[in-house]
Amino acid sequence: MAVVITIEQVREFLGSDYASVPDSTINTYICLVNKLDDCLDLNYPANDCLQSAIKLNAISHFTAMSVGRYLKSQHAPSGASRSFDYFTSAEGIKMTSFGRMIAMLDTAGCFEAAYPQGDQFASGAFGRTCRSCR
């Protein structure tokens, strides 16, 4: 059985940069990512750590995309400053660090198989599919 991810785990994984994202939004992304469970069980049956990493990064990818921006730089000892940049959709899943991590970890292509539309929000940059997950 695939690992179960909680809102608390996602919040801890994301850290303070995404503290303003409502629980209901995170819960929706958890629900979306649970679509990967059959493929994860089939391809990574005895590897709860890998399943957790893939699911946490997938949820975090969706969360980051919903926020639409990321921290580009941060300065301090107190000339405080933060600058943000915005995701460019042409990069597909690789537009977030979370998506790049999914691309590295999910060698079976479970995420790509679950979201094959090739759109910029979820995927399109893998070039592989999970044949055993359909």
Image (cartoon, rainbow, N blue to C red):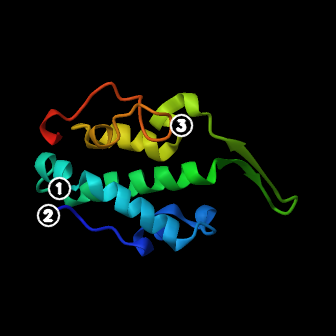
Q: Quadrant of residue 43?
A: top left
Q: Quadrant of residue 130?
A: top left
State the quadrant of the N terminus: bottom left
| Mark 3 or mark 2, earlier in chain | 2
Relative to 78, say whether 90 is above or below. Answer: above
Q: Amino acid at mark 2?
A: Met
Q: Nearer the viewer, mark 1 or mark 3?
A: 3
Where does label 1 land, which residue?
Answer: 47
How many other residues sit within 10 Å of disc 2, few (<14), some (14-19) or many (≥20)? few
Q: Nearer the viewer, residue 70 or 76?
A: 70
Q: Amino acid at mark 1?
A: Asn
Say which element carries label 2: loop
State the quadrant of the C terminus: top left
Relative to 88, say whether 16 is above or below. Answer: below
How many other residues sit within 10 Å of disc 3, few (<14), some (14-19) or many (≥20)? many
Horizontal and vertical percent position of residue 77: 81, 62
Horizontal and vertical percent position of residue 93: 46, 37
Relative to 20, say whether 39 is above or below. Answer: above
Q: Amino acid at mark 3?
A: Met
Q: Quadrant of residue 34?
A: bottom left
Where residue 6 is drawn, which disc sits there? none
3D distance between C-alphas at marks 3 and 2 = 30 Å
Say which element carries label 3: helix
How many other residues sit within 10 Å of disc 1, few (<14), some (14-19) or many (≥20)? few
Where does label 2 land, which residue?
Answer: 1
Horizontal and vertical percent position of residue 18: 59, 63
- In the shown orientation, is residue 132 left or right of residue 112? left
Where residue 95 is drawn, which disc sits there? 3
| Mark 1 or mark 3, earlier in chain | 1
- In the shown orientation, is residue 129 left or right of residue 83? left
